Image (spheres, rainbow, N blue to C red):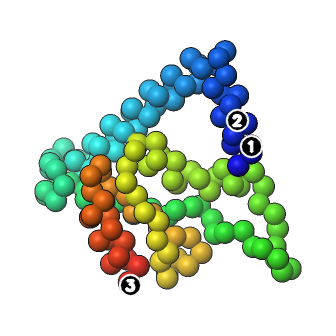
Amino acid sequence: VQRRILAGTAVLSSDRFHTHYEGATNIRAVMTKQFQNAFEHGGGSGGGGIGEEGSIDVMLIPTALSGPPMIGGKDAKPLDSTEAFQNDVMTVPISLAGLPSISVPVDSFSMVGMQIFGPRKSEGQILRVAQALHGV
């Protein structure tokens, strides 16, 4: 956590603000538009809003690239900062795009949870899918 705070402080310093923050804002806008397009058109050319043919209601992806680190025991090894940042790669785009999401444990993927996310204002649909998936 401390490294992330220091990195954020360095990036937002006055001499780097325009270089990093404005570029990140542009990337965020592009990502948001790409997600919106994927939900509305299902990656194709047809379809419309939520629930319409050709659209995607929710998406399901792993929450992290690897399972949690082992704590104690003979197989335990510390999680280095690079591995910790890599585990965030699946959640960061959804957060940057401002999309609702939930992570649920899934029995068949016991070490890595699954993240369900959808377009803005689809929280009810996401919770219904999460409940159905978690109950499987």
Kind of residue at badge 3: Val
Q: Quadrant of residue 10?
A: top right
Give the camera-side residue of 102 and 39: 102
According to the picture, the residue beneath numbered tag 1 turns out to be 3
Residue visible at 81% across and 63% down? 78
Crowd tier of the residue under label 1, counting other residues whose Cα lies within 10 Å: few below 14, some 14–19, many 20 or above: few
| Label 2 – label 1 distance at C-alpha | 6 Å
- Please determine whether, in this image, residue 39 is positioned above or below residue 113: above
Q: What is the secondary structure assignment of the residue under circle 2?
A: helix
Kind of residue at badge 1: Arg
Q: What is the secondary structure assignment of the residue under circle 1?
A: helix
Q: Is residue 134 left or right of residue 48?
A: right
According to the picture, the residue beneath numbered tag 2 turns out to be 7
Q: Earlier in the sequence, mark 3 or mark 2?
A: 2
Residue visible at 39% across and 32% down? 29
Q: Quadrant of residue 80?
A: bottom right
Kind of residue at badge 2: Ala
Give residue 109's position: percent from left, percent from top.
Answer: 52, 76
